[in-house]
């Protein structure tokens, strides 16, 4: 795997976090064959940056907290890299049939959740949603993900797809009482020891 760890994160890196990173990357074909530097952050959940030299990309960096890192956070930062790639380097433009991911934090949340259910293990940070959905995220994750997939589709010809998405998410608690089914949310936890 093309992951390079900074000395600071190396000291703290757990096997769990490393496996989560590698597993997440499987769902990011846009990043395959590229080297990604992984560093540590203390302030934020995570961050992502791209360095350029002479107009081409020289370094892709994500920074994470190792403790209690989620697939949601890893996916969010990797999505930022994909957002940056499609903006910065003409030679890595996605295929014409695949629209590039628009920039922005909410966009990053939407495209991360839509990408795969793996990244639905925790609520996204920027997407606006009722408190009950955040508090009982695993009961709503699948429904929210479905709406994100629909929003990505809708964006092709509807400018206000984020507004549409957030209003649909707001309706979820009333249309769906979301009875707590003990078996279903567990599937979203995707245990590592399988
Ligand atoms: Zn972000």
Image (tube, rainbow, N blue to C red):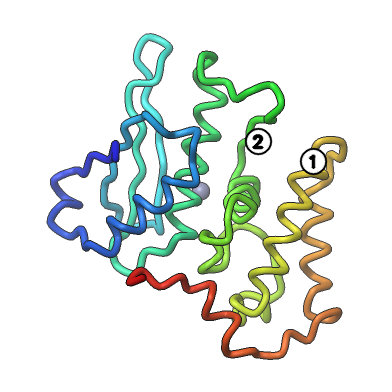
Q: Earlier in the sequence, mark 1 or mark 2?
A: 2
Work out which quarter of the rendered image holds the C terminus and state it: bottom left
Q: Is residue 8 above or below residue 94?
A: below
Circle 2 packing at 10 Å, graded few (<14), some (14-19), many (20+), is some
Confirm or deny contact between disc 1 and disc 2 (CB under 8 A). yes
Work out which quarter of the rendered image holds the N terminus and state it: top left
Q: Is residue 5 left or right of residue 82?
A: left
Residue at image position (32%, 59%) is 65
Pinpoint residue 53: horizontal percent, then vertical percent.
34, 15
Tell me, for residue 155, which label it has, or none. 1
**Which residue was labeled with disc 2?**
102
Query: SS of the residue at dot 2?
Result: loop
Pinpoint residue 15: horizontal percent, then vertical percent.
22, 62
Q: Is residue 24 above or below residue 79?
A: below
Pinpoint residue 54: horizontal percent, then vertical percent.
37, 9
Residue at image position (37%, 64%) is 69
Q: Is residue 116 left or right of residue 55?
A: right
Residue at image position (71%, 74%) is 130
Residue 56 placement: quadrant: top left
Q: Nearer the viewer, residue 121 or 128?
A: 121
Q: Is residue 146 left or right of residue 125?
A: right
């Amino acid at each position: 795997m093309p992951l390079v760890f900074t000395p600071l994160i190396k000291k703290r890196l757990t096997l769990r976090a490393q496996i989560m990173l590698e597993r997440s990357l499987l769902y990011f074909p846009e990043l395959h064959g590229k080297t990604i530097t992984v560093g540590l952050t203390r302030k934020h959940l995570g961050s992502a940056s791209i360095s350029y030299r002479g107009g081409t990309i020289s370094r892709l960096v994500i920074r994470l907290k190792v403790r209690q890192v989620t697939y949601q956070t890893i996916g969010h930062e990797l999505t930022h890299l994909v957002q940056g790639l499609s903006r910065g380097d003409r030679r890595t433009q996605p295929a014409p049939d695949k629209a590039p991911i628009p920039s922005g934090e909410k966009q990053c949340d939407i495209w991360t959740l839509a990408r795969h259910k793996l990244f639905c293990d925790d609520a996204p940070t920027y997407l606006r949603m009722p408190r009950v959905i955040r508090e009982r995220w695993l009961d709503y994750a699948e429904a929210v993900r479905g709406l994100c997939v629909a929003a990505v589709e809708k964006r092709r010809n509807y400018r206000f797809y984020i507004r549409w998405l957030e209003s649909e998410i707001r309706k979820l608690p009333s249309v769906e009482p979301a009875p707590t089914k003990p078996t279903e949310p567990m599937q979203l936890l995707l245990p590592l020891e399988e």
